[in-house]
Amino acid sequence: MATGEANDPLACILTLIIRAGYKERVTYFTGYLQKSNNDASASTFGQLLREEDMKLGFHGATTMTSDLQTDVAASAHAGFKGLEVWVAKPSKLDRFLADHSLADLKALFQDNHVAPMTLNAISFIAFRGEEFGGIKEQCRKLCEIAQAIGCPAVAVVASPTPTWETTWETIVAEHVAALQELSDIARGYGIKLPFEFLGFGWCSVRTPRGAQEIIQKTNRDNVGMVFDAAHFYAGGGLLSEIEHLDPNSIYMFHLDDLEDTCKEAITDGTRLLPGLGVIPLDEICARLKGIGYDGPCTVETFRTEYWEWDPMQVTVKAREAAIKVLSPYFEIE
C-alpha cells in the first residue's frame, strides 16, 4: 500500500475492498462522494479503482511488416488501450520520424486514443565493450522521444552469453553495470527501463529468477522486469519462481504461446497467439495474480504467418485470444 493510502483510513478501506473483488461498491461510493461535492476524495478513490485494472495492449512485433501508423490504427480498431512500439531494426519509429515530427507522433497516438506503452527495445546491453557508448546514445535518444510523447518506458534486453566459460557472477556484474549507467540516463527523462530475459539457449539471462537477481543488485527504482510467457517457458523457468517475484518490479507482461516442440527448437517464429499452444498460461496468470500483479500486458508474437495477415484482423484475433486467457484472473481496462 502506498504511503498516501496508508495515511488515509478511507483509502485503506477502499483498497482492501477493491482487492477483495467488490469493485462495483467502490464505483458506487465514488459516485456518492461526487454528489457530496467531495471531488478530491472521489478522484482519489476513482484512481484506486482504475489502478486495479490491467491495461491490455498490442506489440508491434506481431505485425512486423506494417508501419507505425497502421499499428496504431489497428490497435484502436481492435479496442487495445496501448501499443508497444517496435524500435529495433527494422525500426518502425525511425521510419515514421524520417518524414514526421515528434508532435506528429504524439498526435498519432492521441487521435487514435491509444497510449504508447514502451519503446521496444534496446537489444543486448551487456558485454558490449567499446560499443556500449552507442547503446547509451540509443538510450538517450529513445528516452528523449519517450518523454516527448508521454511513453513511460524504454525496454532493454539481456545479452548473449559470450562463451561457455562465462560465469553467472560475470553475467550478473556486466548486466548490473550496464543497467546502472542506462538507469542514470533514463532517470533524467523520467523514463523506466523494463529489463527482459530471453529463454533461448544462447542468452545469458533466461529466467525471471535470474533477471530478478540482476534487478535487485542494480538497485534502481526505474529498473524492472519484462515477464514474457514464451521466454519463461523456453528458458525453463519454474512456476514456483513467480511466487517470489515482486509485482512492483514487473513493468510488463508479454502474453504469447508456443508450438509443441522440444525447447531446443523454440524460436521467435514458433510463437502463437495466446491459448493456441503448450505454455501453461492459466498457471502463469494465476500465480501473477496471486502475487498482486495487475500491471500492463501486451500480445507479442514474431510469427511470420501473422505478418502476412491483414493487421486489422491480427489485432482483433490477438485481443480476443488475450481476453479469453486473462479474464478469469484479471480485470481488463
Image: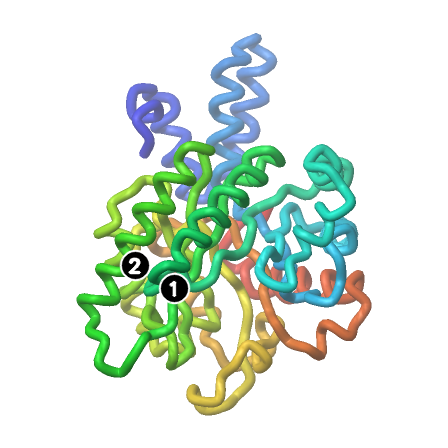
The residue at 52%/60% (across/down) is 328
Q: In which image quadrant can residue 39 be found?
A: top right
Which one is nearer the viewer's eye here, 187 or 15? 187
Residue 28 is labelled as none
Q: Is residue 148 left or right of residue 230?
A: right
Reading the image, the residue beneath label 1 is 158
Binning the other alpha carbons within 10 Å of mark 2 as few (below 14), some (14 to 19) or many (20 upward) gives: many
The residue at 32%/40% (across/down) is 221
Q: Are marks 1 and 2 in contact (CB under 8 Å)?
A: yes
Q: Amino acid at mark 2?
A: His
Q: In which image quadrant can residue 88 be found?
A: bottom right
Question: Where's the C terminus, which quadrant?
Answer: top right
Residue 175 is labelled as 2
Q: Position of residue 69 (x, y in %)?
A: 77, 51
Q: Is residue 251 left or right of residue 319?
A: left
The residue lying furthest to the front in this view is 130
Q: Amino acid at mark 1?
A: Ala
**SS type, badge 2:** helix
Mark 1 and mark 2 lie on one chain; the one further toward the N terminus is 1
Q: Is residue 246 left or right of residue 62?
A: left
Q: In which image quadrant can residue 268 be found?
A: bottom right
Which one is nearer the viewer's eye here, 321 or 260? 260
The residue at 81%/67% (across/down) is 310
Question: Where's the N terminus, which quadrant?
Answer: top left
Relative height, residue 288 to residue 191 (above, below): below
The residue at 58%/70% (across/down) is 274
The Cα atoms of the two marked residues, 1 and 2, are separated by 7 Å
Q: Position of residue 187 (x, y in %)?
A: 39, 36
